[in-house]
């Protein structure tokens, strides 16, 4: 399993996985999220004292998120806070609670800020080397099959449709029986992509395990880099997600999932530039007759 290399987006990943951490590690994460810039300036001893833990706990926290040690985490935090300051993103808590009596303009602003920040966090943590490997595998594949349930399945279906339009043989399944049957027909050179926010959906895991057992290249798209789906996959693309009012974390992850899969789609289209453009021209001409003329 290759997995992703930690290359940024530490704050987003810490925020996403914070509730699942043991209490001691959670204290370290909460302190970092409260003031990332200060954490980047602190020594390991200072951070341990302020979080009520120990330097050994801070080291375990770093390794849990793929960092070799505290110095590597400090560099990542300093880089991320510096980039956010230059871009004017801000590093406060995303959004605020939306009440039943809030005016619609305030609701729209809250949602726009939350969604924009999630895309920024997803972009920051996206491993471009992994994206390139996924795109290369898709271009070379005999067939690409995507698995996802509920809203993740709908997101997978969107990428599947886009890839087919540029002549990539791609199917997506929300039905677990159909998906598992197709997974059993995959082999070396094929690609299986599983989309699951938490990476724990049984139907997706079963289909991906079957595809992996048949020799297909497996790709996980998930918000949890240590989930069963991520552990199963050869390549992992992570998404940022955070709950806001009326939108549990799974629903909040939709925009991030779409962004990551859109990046993959564009990378594939770049690699098949002439073929993709020719396919677009054909399909646009074919659909012209279904468009109403302007008055």
Image (tube, rainbow, N blue to C red):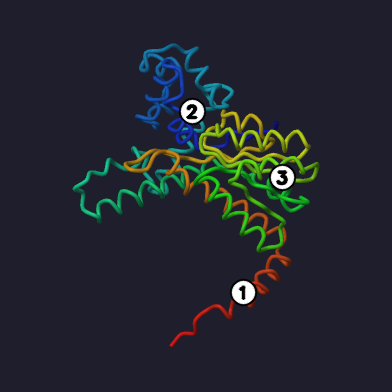
Q: Which mark is residue 182?
A: 3
Residue most toward the front? 177
Query: Which residue carries the number 2 mark?
Result: 74
Cβ atoms at labels 1 and 3 below 8 Å apart: no
Which comes before the other along the chain, label 3 or label 2?
2
User: Which residue is located at x 72 percent, y 38 percent?
Assistant: 211
Query: Which residue carries the number 1 mark?
Result: 284
User: Which residue is located at x 42 percent, y 38 percent?
Assistant: 249
Image position, residue 163 (x, y; %): 65, 58
Q: Is residue 36 above or below residue 94?
A: above
Q: Is residue 198 above or below residue 262?
A: above
Q: Nearer the viewer, residue 253 or 3?
A: 253
Alpha carbon distance from label 3 to label 2: 45 Å
Image position, residue 148 (x, y; %): 58, 43
Q: Nearer the viewer, residue 286 or 17?
A: 286
Q: Is residue 137 left or right of residue 99?
A: right
User: Which residue is located at x 38 percent, y 28 percent?
Assistant: 38
Q: Is residue 25 above or below residue 182?
A: above
Which SS class for mark 2?
Answer: helix
Cβ atoms at labels 3 and 2 below 8 Å apart: no
Numbered disc in front, either 1 or 3: 3
Q: Which mark is residue 276?
A: none
Residue most toward the right? 188
Which comes before the other along the chain, label 2 or label 1?
2
Q: Nearer the viewer, residue 182 or 265?
A: 182
Which SS class for mark 3?
Answer: helix
Which SS class for mark 1?
Answer: helix
Residue most toward the bottom? 295
């Amino acid at each position: 399993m290759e997995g992703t290399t930690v290359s940024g987006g530490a704050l987003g990943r810490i925020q996403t996985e914070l509730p699942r951490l043991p209490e001691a590690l959670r204290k370290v994460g909460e302190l970092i999220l409260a003031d990332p810039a200060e954490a980047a300036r602190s020594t390991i001893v200072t951070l341990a004292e302020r979080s009520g833990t120990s330097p050994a706990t801070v080291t375990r926290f770093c390794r849990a998120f793929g960092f070799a040690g505290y110095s590597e985490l400090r560099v990542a935090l300093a880089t991320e806070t510096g980039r956010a300051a230059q871009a004017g993103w801000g590093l406060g808590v995303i959004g605020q609670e939306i009440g039943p009596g809030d005016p619609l303009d305030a609701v729209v602003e809250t949602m726009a800020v939350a969604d924009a920040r999630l895309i920024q966090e997803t972009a920051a943590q996206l491993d471009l080397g992994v994206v390139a490997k996924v795109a290369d595998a898709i271009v070379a594949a005999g067939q690409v099959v995507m698995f996802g349930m509920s809203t993740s399945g709908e997101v997978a279906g969107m990428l599947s449709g886009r890839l087919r339009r540029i002549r990539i043989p791609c199917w997506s399944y929300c039905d677990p029986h159909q998906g598992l049957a197709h997974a059993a027909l995959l082999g070396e050179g094929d690609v299986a992509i599983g989309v699951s926010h938490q990476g724990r959906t049984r139907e997706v895991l079963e289909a991906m395990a079957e595809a992996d057992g048949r020799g297909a290249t497996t790709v996980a798209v998930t918000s949890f880099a240590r989930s069963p789906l991520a552990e199963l996959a050869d390549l992992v693309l992570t998404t940022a997600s955070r709950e806001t009012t009326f939108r549990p974390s799974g629903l909040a992850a939709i925009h991030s999932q779409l962004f990551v899969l859109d990046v993959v789609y564009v990378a594939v289209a770049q690699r098949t530039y002439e073929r993709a453009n020719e396919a677009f021209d054909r399909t646009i001409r074919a659909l012209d007759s279904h468009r109403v003329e302007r008055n």
